[in-house]
Amino acid sequence: MAINKKYIEQIINVSSKAALASSYLVGKKDKIAADQAAVDSMRAELNKISMNGEVVIGEGSLDEAPMLYTGELLGNKEGPNFDIAVDPLEGTNFAANNLPGAISVIAIAEKGNLFNAPETYMDKIATSKVEKGLIDLDNSLKKNITNLANFMNKDISSITACIMDRPRHKKIIDELKELKVKIKLITDGDVLGALYVSDSKYNVDIFLGVGGGPEGVLAAAALDACDCHFQGRFIFDNDNDINDAKKMGITDLNKKYELNEIIKGDSIFCATGITSGDVLSGIEIKENNYTSETFVTHKNSQFKEIIKRTNPIKE
């Protein structure tokens, strides 16, 4: 089964409108308000679409998030059944402080095809396409970097690794330095971090480290259509997370998930820039129009493009 291509335009519209809504709060030092604006807009636009959509990755559980909560039903209740994963504002600090790299993200897949990830951390690794087994979470960092360098016919010192600048990554960063690997540190936004491996123009060969599990599913949705390699393993380090995982049917707490286990079948992924960064330009407003840039993938039609649009603010 494939998702009708007409939904591409509709999902671009969803992420673009959410990015626009959030853009009015860029630099206002209020990340909660910037996120809420994106959430409100995204929900309103999703409810206009002919579908039976269910949020499998959202802003949290119902008691934490009144809108776009996990399990919320969206759409006009006519049309196909979709799983929906959203991060209405990835990089809340970027938006609040007018820094590069705030984006609005959404993915849809056919019902049952998007992994319902627990709200916990995930150890992840992403590269462009490699031979099976070369890059693996169970390998040592040195083995992964060496294998990647050999596969790409590069010196190790020419490999660039992207990782979030967090105290938990100190050991990995120190080892990357010892290996003389180039390091691209990011402060937030690990969906965008993973997207760097989708195209050689971003000059990132490997993305790795521990970040949000839900963001891992969104990254996988994008990379799936880009013929990339992705693995993730959830980190369950307290009883609450373990109990939540068991309720969701996760029995093997140490399981390593391959890309095709996180997202199956056809999918559409959209990420729209809110503030300009390496991958996407941010929202620009001129008079009564706004210009947006959206990274779009549709797996079945092998569509992968950055689409720039100028639309009236009020339609």
Image (tube, helix red, strand yellow):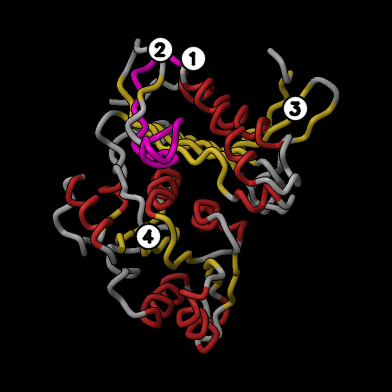
Check disc 3 and give the amino acid type. Answer: Tyr
- Tag 3 or tag 2, which sits nearer the N-term? 2
Judging by the rendered image, the residue that carries numbered circle 1 is 48
Judging by the rendered image, the residue that carries numbered circle 4 is 121
- In screen coordinates, is 165 left or right of 312? left
Judging by the rendered image, the residue that carries numbered circle 2 is 76
Residue 139 position within the rendered picture, expressed as x and y whole percent measured from the top left: 30, 76
Q: Residue furthest front?
A: 63
Circle 2 or circle 3, nearest the eye: 2
Q: Residue furthest bottom?
A: 178
Quick one: 139 or 58, which is closer to the camera?
A: 58
Dividing the image into 4 quarters, which one contains the C terminus? top right
- In screen coordinates, is 194 left or right of 142? right
Q: Quadrant of residue 22?
A: top right
- Tag 4 or tag 3, which sits nearer the N-term? 4
Identify the residue shown where x is 44% and y is 60%: 211
- In screen coordinates, is 112 left or right of 287? left
Quick one: 131 or 121, which is closer to the camera?
A: 121
The vertical placement of 288 against 142, above or below, is above
Dividing the image into 4 quarters, which one contains the N terminus? top left
- Tag 4 or tag 2, which sits nearer the N-term? 2
Q: Marks 3/4: CA distance?
A: 36 Å
Residues tagged 1 and 2 counted as in contact (Cβ below 8 A): yes
Check disc 1 and give the amino acid type. Answer: Lys
Q: Marks 2/3: CA distance?
A: 27 Å
Residues tagged 1 and 3 counted as in contact (Cβ below 8 A): no
Residues tagged 3 and 4 counted as in contact (Cβ below 8 A): no
The vertical placement of 97 against 68, above or below, is below
Residues tagged 1 and 4 counted as in contact (Cβ below 8 A): no
> Circle 2 — which element?
loop
Identify the residue shown where x is 32% and y is 18%: 80
Q: Marks 1/4: CA distance?
A: 33 Å
